[in-house]
Amino acid sequence: MVPLDPSLFIQPFQYEFFTRAIVVSVLVGGVCGLIGVYIVLRGMSYIGHGMSHAVFGGAVVSYIAGLSFYVGAALWGLASAVLINEITRSNKIKADAAIGVVTTAGFAIGVFLISTTRSYTRNIEALLFGNILGITDQDLWIIVFVTIITAAFIFFFQKRLIFTLFDREAAKVYGVKTNMVELSFSLILATVVIASMNSIGVTLLAAAIVAPAISARLITNSFNKMVVLSTILGVIIAFLGMYSSYFFDSASGATIVLYGASAYGFSCLLAFLRKIYQTHSHGKLGHSHPHIHENEHKHEHLKNR
């Protein structure tokens, strides 16, 4: 058997563009995992999918106008966030309907312009499917900036976010400006999507946001632990996906998403095994609950309520 050369494992890092791509993927994975927790717990997993599609229209308009895609994507994404919030608040329309109409319209405009102007370029293809190896220094600094802004927002607004997330009406009673909190969160999500879409792609970005959060949710019931675990999982999934794509010679965005799906499958298995471990039978009756162990042999049952 031919011995495996250890230098093979560090070979990808010899290329500057790949090292930059690794840094970008870790930042994008971490920030998507962080913000994904709040999206999943709100029961609005589709908003990441919808927002990524909405900004695509603005990006296409920017390309046709000869501008940076960030200009159109930012304007379109922020306008979509405000419009969705206003429709939901003013007209008694549920968020899923507003998101479906506004974001799909944005994506449709992009497709319409591509089909009529025949300006389907490789750059636009990168927006759809991601091109993390083509990330520039400008893209890197934008992602760093968005990561810092998102982390700061979550840190300073966490209590109000949680209050609005779990009991919106009670939050209003206690003086929390829930509409402002929800709008601010939507704007932060839009900036994350805009900064990440060039590396992951609009068709795959939603999975990068949701996969770490739902995986963490299956493992823990603690909110704080879920936030930390989802962020860590996002970083690990992005790193492994980006790193292994070098050896598989595969699309990095798709590889990252497949690792996210694998993480979810592993979390399902872990949750299932934990449930079996905690299951007891009393005659023909069976139930499961967590254990609190005391000393070496004694333990007591903590009943679920």
Image (cartoon, helix red, strand yellow):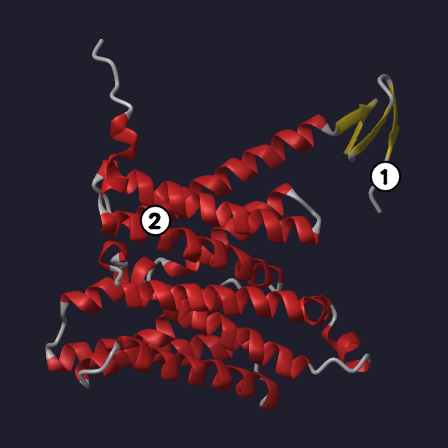
Apparent side of residue 25 relative to residue 267 in the rendered image (left or right): left
Image spot of residue 120 (x, y percent): 14, 72
Number of numbered callouts drawn = 2
Which residue lies under the disc numbered 2?
22
Comes first in the chain, label 2 or label 1: 2
Apparent side of residue 196 relative to residue 272 in the rendered image (left or right): left
Image spot of residue 93 (x, y percent): 57, 83
Secondary element under disc 1, as helix, strand or loop, is loop
Q: Marks 2/1: CA distance?
A: 45 Å
- Residue 178 disc label: none
| Residue situated in front as seen by the camera: 215 or 197 | 197
Residue 5 vertical placement versus 232 (above, below): above
In the picture as drawn, the residue positioned furthest to the bottom comes out as: 90
Is the residue marked by circle 2 packed among few (<14), some (14-19), or many (20+) residues within 10 Å? many
The amino acid sitting under disc 1 is Lys
Tell me the mark number nearer the camera, choosing from 2 and 1.
Answer: 2
The quarter of the image holding the N terminus is: top left
Image spot of residue 82 (x, y percent): 50, 85
Secondary element under disc 2, as helix, strand or loop, is helix
Residue 112 vertical placement versus 266 (above, below): below
Tell me what residue is drawn at x 54 percent, y 62 percent: 35
Which residue lies under the disc numbered 1?
303
Is the residue marked by circle 1 packed among few (<14), some (14-19), or many (20+) residues within 10 Å? few
Can residue 271 be seen?
yes
Image quadrant assignment for residue 105: bottom left
Tell me what residue is drawn at x 84 percent, y 18 percent: 296
Apparent side of residue 71 relative to residue 290 in the rendered image (left or right): left
